[in-house]
Amino acid sequence: MTMSQATAPAAEPASPDSPAGGKDGRTAERSVVRRLLGRPEVGALIAAVGVYVFFFAVAPPFREASSLATVLYQASVMGIMTLPVALLMIGGEFDLSAGVAVTTSALTAAILSYQLTVNVWTGVIVALIASLAVGAFNGWLLIKTGLPSFLVTLGSFLILQGANLAVTKIFTGNVASDSISDMDGFDQAKSVFASEISIGGVNFKITIFYWLVFAALATWLLLRTKFGNWIFAVGGNQDSARAVGVPVKFTKIALFMGVGLGAWFVGMHLLFSFNTVQSGEGVGNEFLYIIAAVIGGCLLTGGYGSAVGPVIGAFIFGMVSQGIVYANWNPDWFKAFLGVMLLLAALVNLWVRRQATRR
Amino acid sequence: MTSNGNDKGKGTATGGTAVKDAPEDGAPLVELRAAGKSYGNVRALHGVDLTVRPGQVTCVLGDNGAGKSTLIKIVSGLHQHTEGEFLVDGEAVRFSTPREALDRGIATVYQDLATVPLMPVWRNFFLGSELTRGPWPLRRLDIERMKKTADEELRAMGIVLDDLEQPIGTLSGGQRQCVAIARAVHFGARVLILDEPTAALGVKQSGVVLKYIAAARDRGLGVIFITHNPHHAYMVGDHFSVLRLGTLELSAARSEITVEELTNHMAGGAELTALKHELAQVRGVDVAELPGEEDVQAPAAASAEASSGASSEKTS
């Protein structure tokens, strides 16, 4: 029973150049600025301030509180979806079906409620199950086939896009779902998903508050829970993660189901805002979510990022899309502006990360 | 030794089973009997016997493609054997995930996939076995305790890091290996599998890793040390198995073999002798210094040779 502490040679310093006093001595303490720059969202924050100042200067209407409410609303609808997409990206995967999945969810609730003439809450719950099922299917297919998520979700994107149009036409003979505004439970559901809250005379859409609450939850999940640790691990090095006992399959499927949850929520918001859903909507939004996550400092290859970053990314998106209008520019420039923002953000992130890890 | 192991095992949420008392008679922790593995029609491993006992280092040597990786993947639960038997504590098992192997106290430190480079050191240390506190909806990582424990364990291994928040990718290769070994020891591993831990390391760092292998052995762990460096193997090994083309070429205890014989077996043994003859005919290659037939005879080594092996170990 000789004990290890006595026998372990490890008790002594590893190498002569480890001085006493408990410090290695070779790594200087990183300065506060460096540590700050090491955060994934700092690059996006700098960019957000820049964009805000820019539109504040060139577009007088942009300075009003009601404009801020509009910008925040625009950002929140996008931002709620960006959060799970960002988590999935940190976990090392893409979901190209995220844009049309929103429409699928809204259509499911609308058509089901209308055709069966049931309380809209039934449709809402069935839509939730359908959205989670789509996410689980994406994740399961990815795990089973080992194909890249880009391919798997490109497939499900096309399937959903086609099904949205075809199924809607079967039931309504039209490309839009029937209006459900006079159905049981509509007002109740609208107050939950699409109401407004007045603060100081300015009306803020309820999605803004959901967005911030979800962002706080996502941050907590990512940094303070086991599952968050697993997300970083499966994105950073999947084989290592599996080898030390991280349930990789569970984590990935859960992340895809998270995207389904987000799609359901945004889908419900759109449905109860407009009473009806255009079945061709949502195409192309999946890239906007990914762009917002990248602008927010999430690494395209996974393993690095935050939930706060995508919030800032979505806010930049909202500012740009509304700022162009307030500045009386041709809105056609929006996508071009967004492309420039994306490239700038990617470069800033690269620079920031180099600064942070430089020794 | 076990009391310490148990103390360290305690307080881990899902960390492997606590260290059990090492069997008094040194019964094998892990045993392979005529085990093999085929990938489709490729037979990567065939008829391999291997025994791992507590407090012993079993070295598995072999050239590239000899089947070393396949062997450890079976034991660590990444792959399943297709022939023969795999016993843990005398009980036939078949792991389907590394988690099951971990739960039986078999921990593997991989050469290339030991860590997640972008994650902080302390998160890597506890990855897959995170400590938590609080009831379910509010259950959260116990960051304070994890950082403290990781720092203590690393210091006990002689690794002093200023900042546990730094990404583990910024550490040197040797430090990363040591973090991985410290992690395995902390989580109550009874069997430690090291996949070429010294392959990518410098001389000094290899020495550090070898010290931890010895430390783990002295704690009563059974160690499987995979390497293709016979000198490193001979410094810490108690038993040597040489794999060649998926089969066991040599299985010998330390007392039965010298480091020279081990080197010759590693280098290809009989094939080298044939090569020597060929070289002698080609041009004026001086073959007198090359090992001959007599050096590559299997483990018929006398004790005298063992002592000469020990002396050469010091010089190597």
Image (cartoon, rainbow, N blue to C red):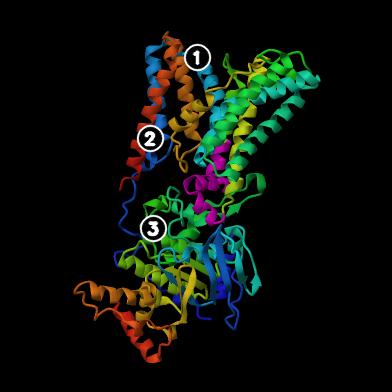
Residue for badge 1: A67
Q: Is residue B184 above or below residue A149?
A: below
Number of disc labels: 3
Distance from label 3 to label 1 (Cα)?
50 Å
Q: Looking at the picture, do discs 3 and 1 lie on one chain?
A: no
Is residue A104 in sight in this rendering? yes
Q: Name the magenta segment's main secondary structure.
A: helix
Residue for badge 2: A349
Callout 2: SS: helix
Q: Which amino acid does label 3 sit on?
A: Leu
Q: Where is residue B235 in the image (x, y as percent from the top left)?
A: 38, 77
> Do the residues bearing badges 3 and 1 touch, measured as CB atoms within 8 Å?
no
| Residue at image point 73% right, 20% down | A111
Chain letter for mark 3, please.
B
Please name whichever residue, A118 or A163, is drawn nearer the observer in this view of the structure: A163
Residue for badge 3: B161
Asked if the stretch drawn in magenta spans residue A46, the answer is no
Please name whichever residue, A59 or B172, is drawn nearer the observer in this view of the structure: B172
For the residue carrying disc 2, how many other residues have a C-alpha within 10 Å: few (<14), some (14-19), or many (20+)?
A: many
Q: Looking at the picture, do discs 2 and 3 lie on one chain?
A: no
Q: Where is residue B275 in the image (x, y as percent from the top left)?
A: 31, 73
For the residue carrying disc 1, how many other residues have a C-alpha within 10 Å: few (<14), some (14-19), or many (20+)?
A: some
Q: Magenta residues, as a range?
A: A217-245
Chain letter for mark 2, please.
A
Determine whether, in the image, residue A9 is placed left or right of residue A18.
right
